[in-house]
Image: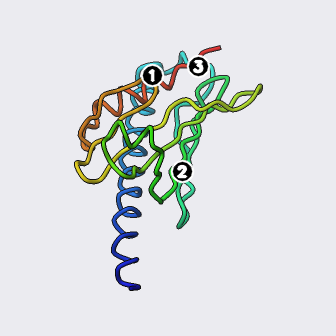
Amino acid sequence: MQDHVHTTTEPSFAFSVELWERVFASLQVVCEEARSLFGTQLRHSGFAASSPSVSANGAVCEITTGRSSLRFECRFSPAEDPELCAVLDSRSVACVHVWRLRARGVELETILAAEPERRRWFATNPPTVPAPLDDARTLQAVLWTLLGDPP
């Protein structure tokens, strides 16, 4: 019985870690592109993802985007959110929640959700259609939309 629990838990953990690694790698690319593109025009020295804080339960990193920061959080366990699962037609999904931290409070910006069976992901804001997990260009396009710092 212990082996069965291990085999059903391990793929979810490994897939969540893989999702995190793909998101963080794309975030680093987008930050580098933003620094190259905007250079000295940046009012703040932002657009650099902090080194992720990784534990057995998940990972977190932050990026300053001007007057606010974005906090990326991934729990290394599957989510069974019915809405997210329905979009991907899956029983469970791995998620990265992106929060905008402002002086006036915290807002959920988007959820990046992925499913391991067909290896697809999507974003809730901007809403995207499911894309292959290895589609870094689409993921980077979504991350670019988050760099803006709306009032």
Q: Residue at x 44, y 25 (%)?
A: 34
Residue 31, quarter of picture: top left
* Nearer to me, 147 or 122: 122
Q: Residue at x 25, y 48 (%)?
A: 119
Look at mark 1 in the image and give the residue it sits on: 145
Indicate whether 62 appears above or below 55. Answer: above
Circle 3 SS class: loop
Q: CA distance from mark 2 to mark 3?
A: 21 Å
| Residue type highlighted by circle 3 | Asp
Q: Residue at x 43, y 23 (%)?
A: 126
Lower sequence index among marks 1 and 2: 2
Contact between labelled residues 2 and 1, with CB atoms less than 8 Å apart? no
| Residue type highlighted by circle 2 | Ser
Estimate the x, y position of residue 151 in percent, counting from the top left: 65, 14
Lower sequence index among marks 2 and 3: 2
Look at mark 2 in the image and give the residue it sits on: 51
* Nearer to me, 149 or 131: 131
Contact between labelled residues 3 and 1, with CB atoms less than 8 Å apart? no
Estimate the x, y position of residue 51 in percent, counting from the top left: 54, 50
Mark 1 Cα shell of 10 Å, populated few (<14), some (14-19), many (≥20): few
Quarter of the picture containing the N terminus is bottom left
Look at mark 3 in the image and give the residue it sits on: 149
| Residue type highlighted by circle 1 | Thr
